[in-house]
């Protein structure tokens, strides 16, 4: 890991190394594999672009049941703050009708995004909707819908790397970095 990275006007320092992220995803994948081992109809993995792209890839490599992949793009963050308003930036790349859907997210913060995503999936005819997030900020999460699968919980800090960005930069780092406190 780099001792620090600079993105736009902010500095970030090491937080979670890639190896730790992978270990957490190993454990998570085992749980999902066990839950879906007897499923006959292939479930749909719904990748929420752009933040979840690396997590979804890393997770899918470990899934050992047949599954489809659909993506969509939403946006709620501006800089380092959640705006609370979810914008659908790109529609679904495939059908969810009658499917068991596993929504894969990078991080659940207030839960506004996941709340909106579950509504969209249901209105698109999904037969079952589960939420799978790489990260959860339990101190900030204020919704009641259960997050079915979480790889790691973190404190309320702003992070980048492993798909997560600060104004579109930082997604390419494989390790996770946290905003340096001033
Ligand atoms: P929520 O709607 O739950 O408040 O926010 C979820 C979305 O906000 C995530 O999908 C992610 O795009 C973004 N987000 C939340 N926390 C962070 C963070 O610490 N770092 C980054 N880069 N994005 C975050
Ligand atoms: Mg996101």
Image: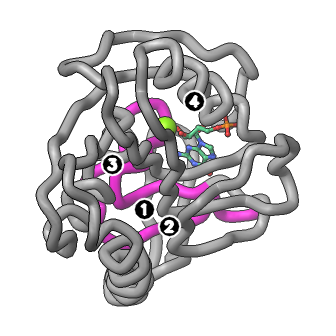
Work out whether mark 4 precedes mark 2 in sequence or the reverse, and give the earlier one.
Answer: 4
Residue highlighted by disc 3 = 171
- Foreground tag (3 vs 1): 3
Q: What's the distance in space between the residues labelled 4 and 2, CA to CA?
A: 29 Å
Q: Contact (CB < 8 A) between labels 1 and 2?
A: yes
Label 3 crowding class (10 Å Cα cut-off): few <14, some 14-19, many 20+? many
Q: Is 118 left or right of 60, judged from the image as shown?
A: right
Q: Is 148 left or right of 3, judged from the image as shown?
A: right
- Foreground tag (4 vs 3): 4
Q: What's the distance in space between the residues labelled 3 and 1, CA to CA?
A: 12 Å
Residue depicted at 59% across the width and 60% down the height? 148
Percent position (x, y) of residue 114?
Answer: 61, 35
Span colored in magenta? 159-181
Q: Nearer the viewer, residue 86 or 96?
A: 96
Tell me how many marks there are.
4
Residue highlighted by disc 4 = 118
Q: Examine the rendered structure and indicate whether residue 13 appears above or below residue 125.
A: below
Residue highlighted by disc 2 = 177
Prevailing SS of the magenta stretch: loop
């Amino acid at each position: 890991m780099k001792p620090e990275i600079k993105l736009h006007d902010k500095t970030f320092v090491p937080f979670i190394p890639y190896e730790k992220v992978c270990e957490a995803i190993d454990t998570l994948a085992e749980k999902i594999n066990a839950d879906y081992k007897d499923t006959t109809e292939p479930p749909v993995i719904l990748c929420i672009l752009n933040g979840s792209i690396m997590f979804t890839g890393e997770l899918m490599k470990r899934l050992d049941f047949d599954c489809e992949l659909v993506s969509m793009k939403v946006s709620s963050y501006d800089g380092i703050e959640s705006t609370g308003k979810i914008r659908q930036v790109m529609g679904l790349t495939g059908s969810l009708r009658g499917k068991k859907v596993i929504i894969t997210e990078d991080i659940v913060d207030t839960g506004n995004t996941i709340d909106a995503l579950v509504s969209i999936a249901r209105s698109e005819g999904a037969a079952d909707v589960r939420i799978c997030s790489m990260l959860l900020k339990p101190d900030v999460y204020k919704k009641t819908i259960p997050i079915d699968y979480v790889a790691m919980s973190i404190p309320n800090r702003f992070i980048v790397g492993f798909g997560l960005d600060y104004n579109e930069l930082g997604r390419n780092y494989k390790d996770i970095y946290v905003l340096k406190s001033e």
